[in-house]
Image (cartoon, helix red, strand yellow):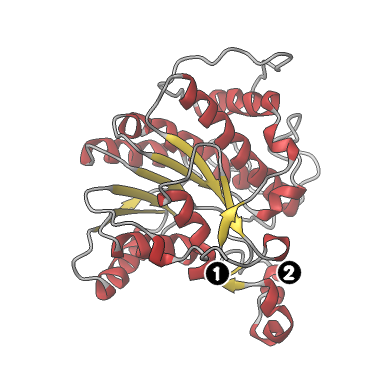
Amino acid sequence: MATRWSEREVPDQDGRTAVITGANSGLGFETARILARRNMVVVLACRDIGKADEARDRILAEAPTASVRTLGLDLCSQASVRRAAVRIMRDHARVDLLINNAGAVIRRREVTEDGFEKTLATNHLGAFAFTGQIMERLLNTPGSRVVTVSSVGHKRGVMNFDDLHFAHGYRFNHAYFQSKLANLLFTYELQRRLAAVGAPTIAVAAHPGNARTAFGADQLPIRIFTSPRLRLLTWWMLQDSTTAALSIVRAAVDPAATGGQYYGPDGRNEWTGHPVQVQSIPQSHDANAQQRLWELSEQMTGVSYPLGDRPTAPGAHHATAM
């Protein structure tokens, strides 16, 4: 019987640097803690710099010799994304690992300062722009990876290209599932582009299953589902954040991982369990949708990746920004 992949399998990361978005709590924090304990320089890129500093101190209390830094990054703001990218480019000669972990679920439709629906802005557009603006550091680092965190909820996602920002008929669950499908379309398109130029960087995706974290705690359905009173009924559907983070960690450091792979829990419905390679829905592998989302993301954020142009897929849409 194969050994279940666990924190013990994480190789020593001495000399390597990771940037993790949304790392002050939950899955991002657990991922940062594990990597810092394996001697990786970890940058906690968070919207609230005070909470990032607190998270750094918690890690250092457990691992006093760890190297943990903090960075202000609000993915809802393209201006904040640019500032954070400039800091990374200035302060780090190499980036071995970027983990696009930060995410949000927004109950009522909100529009960011850039005119984007907030769920899409946080879960996809911010990550797209930040990745592109620090891509040179990744490309200059052999063995580097971009890991983007999706969700088992992507299976219910539909890309509404005619109304990506849900200007008509907003439903928070539809917006969230769309953004999680977008994470996979982005990962697979990025991997295709990296491979086309022979880059030393790979793109991998992961999802944590169902975790007991503060994520979505302000949303009534999630708050009820995860309440301590229901734990006797829902224990088999939810797992602690440390175990849930292992899918992300495996995607980030497993020497056997290859570009375009997707990791998630091995349990029923991929809700809980230890990390294994899993499959995303067929819609996530639609090359036309991948390229269309990429083109729209470039147009909306103004960010172009230093990878050259990929040939147009047969029948692909040349999308215009919505």
Residue 313: x, y in percent? 66, 16
Q: Give the crowd class for mark 1: few <14, some 14-19, many >=20 residues within 10 Å.
A: some
Whether 21 is drawn above or below 93: the answer is below
Residue 194: x, y in percent? 46, 26
Residue sitting at x 56%, y 23%: 299
> In the picture provided, is 11 more to the left or to the right than 21?
left
Which of disc 2 and disc 1 is earlier in sequence? 1
Q: Residue 44: which quarter of the image?
A: bottom left
> In the picture provided, is 317 more to the left or to the right than 77?
right
Whether 282 is drawn above or below 43: the answer is above
Q: Nearer the viewer, residue 295 or 290?
A: 290
Residue 253: x, y in percent? 40, 51
Residue placed under numbered mark 2 in the picture: 221
Q: Nearer the viewer, residue 247 or 214?
A: 247
> Is residue 132 visible to the viewer in this orientation of the structure?
yes
Residue placed under numbered mark 1 in the picture: 214
Q: Secondary structure at mark 2?
A: helix
Marks 1 and 2, Cα distance to the nearest angstrom?
13 Å
Whether 47 is drawn above or below 289: the answer is below
